[in-house]
Image (spheres, coloured by chain):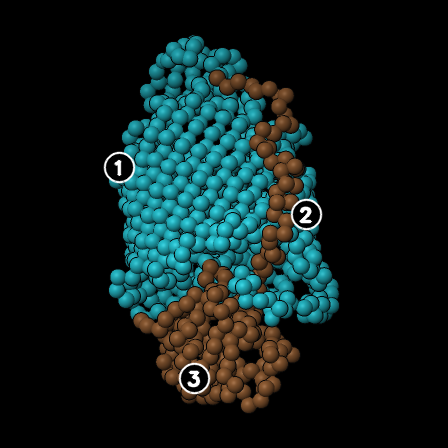
Amino acid sequence: MPVLKSEASRSTCRGTPLGAGALILLCLAGRGLAQDAPDTLPEYVIKAGFLFNFAKYVDWPASAFPQADSPIQIGIVGKDPFGADLEKTLKNKTVKNRTFTVVHFAEPGDIRSCHMLFVSKSEKGRLPEILEQAGRWPVLTVGEDPDFARSGGATTILIEQEKPRLEVNPEAAEKAGLTISAKLLKAATIVKTGK
Amino acid sequence: MPFRKRRLGTRPGGPIVGVLALLLLAAGRPAAFAQDAAQEPRQDVTEIDLDDLLKVHVSSPSKKDQSLNDVPAAVTVLRGEDLRRIGATTIAEAMRAVPGFHVGRTKSSVWAVSPRGFSDELSNKLLVLIDGRSVYSPLHSGVYWDVQDVFLDDVDRIEVIRGPGGTLWGANAINGVVNVISKPAGDTQGVLVTAGGGTEERVFTGARAGFKAADNVDVRVFAKYALRDDALDGVDPQHRAYDGWNLGNTGFRADWKASASDRVTVSGGYYEGQVKEQFASATLTAPFVETIRDRMDLKGANALFRWERTFDPTSSISVQMYYDYTFRDEAVFKDVLHTGDFDFQHRFTPTEGNDVIWGVGYRIYRSTTDGSFTFNVNPPGHTDDVISAFIQDEILLFKDRLRLTLGSKFEQNDYSGFEFQPTARLAWTPEETHMAWASLTRAVRTPSIIDNDGRLTPTVIGGGAVPIALSIFGNEDFQTETLLATEAGYRVRPVDPLSLDLALFMNHYDRIRTGSIGAPFLETTPPPLHAVIPVNLDNRQHGQTRGVELAANLQAAPWWLLQVNYTYLHMNMNTDTTNRRSPHEQVWLRSAMDLPGNFSVDATARYVSGLPAFDLKSYVEADLRLAWRDASRRFEAAIVGQNLAHKSHSEFDVASKRSEIQRGVYASLTCRF
């Protein structure tokens, strides 16, 4: 039979090995360990941020720029997923004294010389054509399709479980005459061209 | 993402529309609002360096809906951010945000959480997993929501499958699966301290510290404590009920990147708490009923190990093992349960266009239930195991447009023997913004311990020559409950800020639990001599349910998200009391606004239609949250009002068994450093 338990224990909490003291200790223990908590941003603001960072951590051959302060040209091929986010992000920003300009290419055949080429998801079926076109200049190709770098693209910005991940194909970058800094290589997953 | 036993990585097909007051507020100063919002600088992404940028989560709702777009099932994802902004303090309360779910709060800390009908405090057709650990009780197949307590800031998301998930998850996932997924330790670095209190959520406090233990090892530890006030008595709402709750909870998680392709996770936790309970209990001596007041003791511990190796994006293996201990000392029984579980999964692509996932599992339960006259289990000890295997193939039929998923789970259990739970799902994605799906699934609920060996005596009738006890008895021949579900759904993003998710189902249930009166007999123990009228559990309930679940998301402005969920349910079981326990219609509305000056205002409102089984009329309730955080987002202050529409209201069960839930207000402070 059930037994009426004592009322005396009314406000006690046996499940509290977690008093204020423990909290304070925990707080002190963790102080200074951590950076700011991860934030959230829209996908294409994040991707714009990576394009800016690529400009910082990739070196183009001197011949790629007419002058020491020529802007870095970012081409977008296919359906532009950035809206106004890319222009807004890069407006008045400089890397190594260079500003940014953005150009759009509707078709692979329209691709002209630029420094970075963002290959939109819409172009998944035309990758070989695009990579061949871009291969004529020292262009850092940037894709968002999971097969991009493996197909011979230089870098891929993937979103997995709502977080970004980078893939770099050093072989492809080298072929384009680009030097990728150790920092970027370390942050990325290295992949090779191949099926 | 295909429909598989993996994280979905998606976002809510959530809902919505603004609450009237907010609409008025916004309408009053639209110009000023829009301007301020536009001027508010978004964080400059060029100031985030490479390594930090990799830690930023994607927030765009439209993009998340894309991945959701691929799942050929009715799926809702609540993100950690949604939980925070809704102001939910428990998983059970958060389930109100999921279309198709009915959440009826019976007492201060007792909830009936049921998807697609069959509402009950011990709803036995729902599978709940916390980081891969199953938490329903094999005693009765229900979930004790009062101990499913997590550190909410560490929750990455709650993935909810509405409808049968048995093909991958096994028995009990008959009407839905709730999968609580916490963030990897690497995402919770730093210290977070939170504290608050109010009128109903009296005290809550918690702290978490995340750090790097070694080069590739991230660790976090947390501790929390919360105390919830009594609600009001269901029969006499002038007085307090005796149903308060408190729980302390501590745990850790470590994630080790053993190599580029290997991830190892080890986690563990311990909790201890108490819940007050008061109820009328039958006795064999006059007046044949006594009021029990008890403070139940609850304890639990768990430890989990998981190893995942990823060969490439479509090929991986994982091994998971866990041990779980629960201890529950209620007034009329004491239950001790040990669970051990092993799970192996392998995903691979045998040929182009086939994505196969298969796995095997073994689970062992050892339970001991010390009962009483009111409730007991005979024999009190059980050691049961379940061996299972599943396989599923997702086949591309036509380019990326048409996919067929075929699969089945097979399991062998000690009660009903062999069970199979197959599914066929077809998904058609004509373009990225549209997806239609349809499925046919068989799912089962296997017998629980009480279905076989339980005895519950809710009533004793005195006044005759001997007292007469009405007892519900388990039945060794109790059969598996079965469901044959036909489902269809459509998801569309007609314009970028709007997404719609529609799901329809028609379910045929068979062999659902019922009771039949058996031949009376006399019993001498416990004394005095008494007659027993047995009600033997059997499987004579069958019928159909039909339903519609609609979720709409509208990003009305960059700073304003509106969601609406609509749920329609028609139950036509041959036992009318079942039909009358679940609401016919429900509406849930949410408005989430980011205001200038780092303020945010969140409001939810809900309509739940009446429950004739309990003489409960329909009700409308609303929650409101106002928060401010500093520009660096290290500090947040919030004030939350819950159930604001009434001083108190009732949600579920008969008056003698329920409490009235009161309006509540609490404030909280959260600090990260």
User: Please, what secondary structure does the residue beneath circle 2 have?
Assistant: strand
* Image hue for chain B: cyan
Under mark 1, the amino acid is Gly
In the rendering, at what x and y percent does residue B221 appear? 54, 44
Q: Earlier in the sequence, mark 2 or mark 1?
A: 1
Determine the residue positioned at 58% across, 84% down. A71
Q: Circle 3 is placed at which residue position?
A: A134
Q: Circle 2 is placed at which residue position?
A: B669
Determine the residue positioned at 52% across, 35% down. B271
Under mark 3, the amino acid is Ala
Residue B109 visible in the snapshot: yes
Tell me the distance, in whole angstroms, between the alpha carbons under discs 3 and 2: 53 Å
* Image hue for chain A: brown
Foreground mark, 3 or 2? 3
Q: Circle 1 is placed at which residue position?
A: B417
In the rendering, at what x and y percent does residue B580 appear? 47, 40
Please give left or right for residue B449 compared with residue B302 in the image. Answer: left
In the rendering, at what x and y percent does residue B346 appear? 31, 53
Chain letter for the residue marked with disc 3 in the picture: A
Residue furthest to the bottom in view is A66
Name above or below for residue B216 compared with residue B141. Answer: below
Quarter of the image for the N terminus of chain B: give it: bottom left
Chain letter for the residue marked with disc 2 in the picture: B
Determine the residue positioned at 56% across, 26% down. B295
User: Please, what secondary structure does the residue beneath circle 1 have?
Assistant: strand
